[in-house]
Amino acid sequence: MRNPHPVTRRSRRRTPALLTAVLAAVALVLAACSGSSGGAGAVTTIRVALDWTPNTNHTGLFVAQQQGWFRDAGLDVQILPYNSTSPDTLVGSGAAEFGISFQNSFTFSKAAGADIVSVMAILQHWGSGIAVRADRTDITSPKDLDGKIYGGFGDPGETPKMAAVIKDAGGQGRFDTVVLGTSAYEALYSGQVDFTEPFTAWEGIEAQLRGEPLRTFAYTDYGFPDAYGVLLEGNGGWLAAHPDVATKFVQAAQRGYQFAADEPTAAGKMLSDANPGAFTEPTLVDRSQQMLAATYMKDANGRVGTQQAAQWAGFSGFLYDAGVLVDSAGKPLAARPDFSTWFTDRYQGATP
């Protein structure tokens, strides 16, 4: 099952030795792609780390690549295949200039000292939600999840988030958790767990296509803060040193995502064409892109990419208040971060 879930990869712990080896291997393989060639008409290579195998969270990148918008900007964009090291780590270490992340994982990585900056919101809202099987007539609200079993992913923010939504819906916020990773979806279908957290525009649609429809509850319907479901992040030091190149890349990517939001059918086909054999169910890609375009990608003015300090402070501030953010030494943060410094729209274009 292809899974672009925003928390699954963050739950996997890597040993320092393994992490060092992975980063070293990436650096060796991509050393020739780390900068610009000299002279007139020079082409700059940009490495973008994916969070999972290609899916509709990445459509804008492939649209910009297929349409030649990166090339027109003088960029050779290398979309790095997913590996077990998170984009937050790859981008923060300089093994990639940009990567796909999520406000959730980004917050934990940034708090721990990662040199990353969010340069664009790919999704304006949560991409995930609380889900139960549609045939569970005993669960019609998150408050009914008290005493139930949650199939989780090991993310430190999951329990306080779920508890807060259940309380906001009128419950006590008490439930049991079993950490299952991507096996949580099958466990939900089979009735081994009562609820989990799928990516609505992927696993939610996938469940319908396989005849296992889900009932989903949006966190924000119960007063929980909204969050940017998917982000484009950059290495902070590299951005500061290469503002012009960063602007060219971000604006080309933003153009690709704007196209995906405005022309979802054509964009979904470009995603599939750029990744032959990656999708066994074309309907899933099309329906996913349609859903993202209709509900998740655009701000109130119809633009993609924009970010607001209030939304960053809302959910990321919740994680700080919940006491789950830790520094590089693993100790709880001593002071509330200035979340307005964690993102920038300066590299984006002024119009769609």
Image: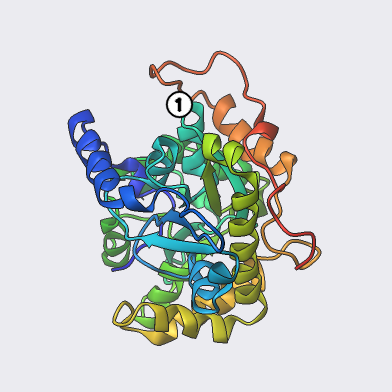
> Which of 267/323 is in front?
267
Q: Is residue 70 left or right of residue 153?
A: right
Whole-percent x, y for residue 25 in the image = 22, 45
| Quadrant in which the C terminus appears | bottom right
Quadrant location of residue 50? bottom left
> Which of 121/296 is in front?
121
> Which of 80/194 is in front?
80
Q: How many marks?
A: 1
Tell me which residue sits at (48%, 70%) in the image: 56
Whole-percent x, y for residue 319 in the image = 55, 32
Tell me which residue sits at (66%, 40%) in the image: 312
As drawn, which residue projects farthest toward the top?
334
Please determine whether, in this image, residue 37 is positioned above or below residue 189.
Answer: above
Whole-percent x, y for residue 293 in the image = 62, 73
Please determine whether, in this image, residue 119 is positioned above or below residue 273.
Answer: above
Q: For the residue marked with disc 1, what is the amino acid?
A: Ala
Q: Is residue 122 visible?
A: no
As drawn, which residue projects farthest toward the front?
39
Tell me which residue sits at (59%, 52%) in the image: 245
Q: Is residue 238 left or right of residue 210?
A: right
Q: Within 10 Å of the Cα at label 1, are there few (<14), some (14-19), or many (20+) other Cα atoms? A: some
Residue labelled with disc 1:
112
> Which of 191/280 is in front?
280
SS for callout 1: loop
| Quadrant in which the N terminus appears | bottom left
Tell me which residue sits at (60%, 65%) in the image: 73
